Image (tube, rainbow, N blue to C red):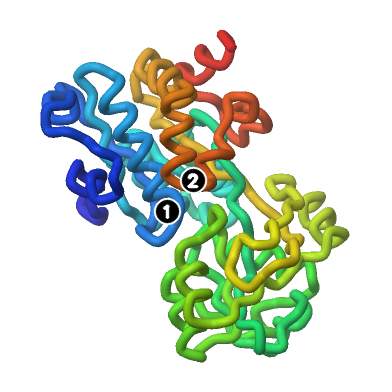
Amino acid sequence: MKHTVAFIAAGVLSLGLGVSSGSNVAQASQSISLATGGTGGVYFPLGGAMAEAWSQQIPDLRVTAESTGASVVNVRIVEQGEAELAMVQNDIANYAFHATEMFADDSPKESNLGMALLYPEVIQIVTLADSGIESVNDLAGARVAVGAPGSGTEANARQILMAHDIAYADITEHFLPFGEAVDAIRDGRIDAAFLTAGIPTAAVVDLGATHDVSIVPVDPDMAEEVSEEWPFYAGFTIPGGTYSGIEDDIPTVTVLAMLVANADLDADLVEQMLEVLFAEETLERLCDTHARGCDISLEDAAEAMPVPLHPGAEAFFERQ
């Protein structure tokens, strides 16, 4: 993958996941890639833990997790055959499969097939406690980071603003990925930023170490309207204490992280990878890696799948 940075065994070791040079990672006869996201998010560490589990538990297989631009980039590189697996938002997977939203000018990405739903990806509207922004309506007239151009976060920001009758013309929009957006809040260059990620998000934790952070709520009634218009959303509550200095629960909305697999990936291998993924040992490993790994469960892994299942995933879930 020319435009990604490999999460190789040394990177796994740096997270304390303990791949040994004598494991089947080094001896694998088949290598596949898992596209994840930026190093400051949740996809990257969880993807690394998944890759390590698959590489250790499936003979002759090496899975390498790659740092990428996340969902929108990921469905494109899976479609192009540059990665066999990817972590993406469920709404983005659907947009890609049906060639809508940011994929409206493309052909449908029908090689991206569902493997498993994973955990909530929470829409977080981040600001500083002294910004004066206490509601979504207060964003009108503000300098707001809405995500990288064409990203899943940007679609989420635009749709939530639209539900509140706020257009980009009503704000000063900045198209920034969330790491840069948080830096811009820290430096006083913007007032607020939309982030879509598992919680706690490392970039927000880092910001909270030096500044008093606030998360702007999405009113539950409005969250219901958003989910009626775009059924990939669901109401969600960020528990108090998730971030330093924020003790109250914060209502918002969420989408879901999921795994997609290229349609050409061997069905028996996909089925075997799901067996490993939902084994008790792997789920414990994911929970230890990041709090959102604790949300991954077999019970919820195939409900409301936004794209057709990969044949290997279909066979796995039929047996459960």
For image coordinates 41% across by 34% down, the residue present is: 285
Judging by the rendered image, the residue that carries numbered circle 2 is: 88
**Lower position in the chain sequence, tag 1 or tag 2:** 1
Please give the count of numbered marks on the rendered protein. Answer: 2
Location of mark 1 (residue) = 70
Seen from the viewer's position, the closer of residues 92 and 24 is 24
Disc 2 marks a residue whose amino acid type is Val
Task: Name the quadrant of the C terminus.
Answer: top right
Name the secondary structure under disc 1.
loop
Question: Is residue 51 positioned above or below 320 on the image?
Answer: below
Q: Is residue 259 left or right of residue 78?
A: right
Residue drawn 23% across the image and 17% down it: 59
Q: What label does residue 111 carry, if any?
A: none
Residue at image location 26% in from the left, 54% down from the top: 4
Cβ–Cβ under 8 Å for marks 1 and 2: yes
Q: Position of residue 138 (x, y in %)?
A: 75, 83
At 44% across and 79% down in the image, what residue appears?
183
Q: Is residue 185 left or right of residue 9?
A: right
SS type, badge 2? strand
Query: What type is the residue that disc 1 sits on?
Result: Ala
Packing grade of label 2 (10 A; few <14, some 14-19, many >=20) is many
Rendering coords of residue 13 (x, y %): 23, 45
Q: Is residue 30 above or below residue 68?
A: above
Q: As drawn, is 59 to the left or to the right of 263? A: left
Residue 119, by quadrant, is top right
Which is more toward the observer, 180 or 153? 180
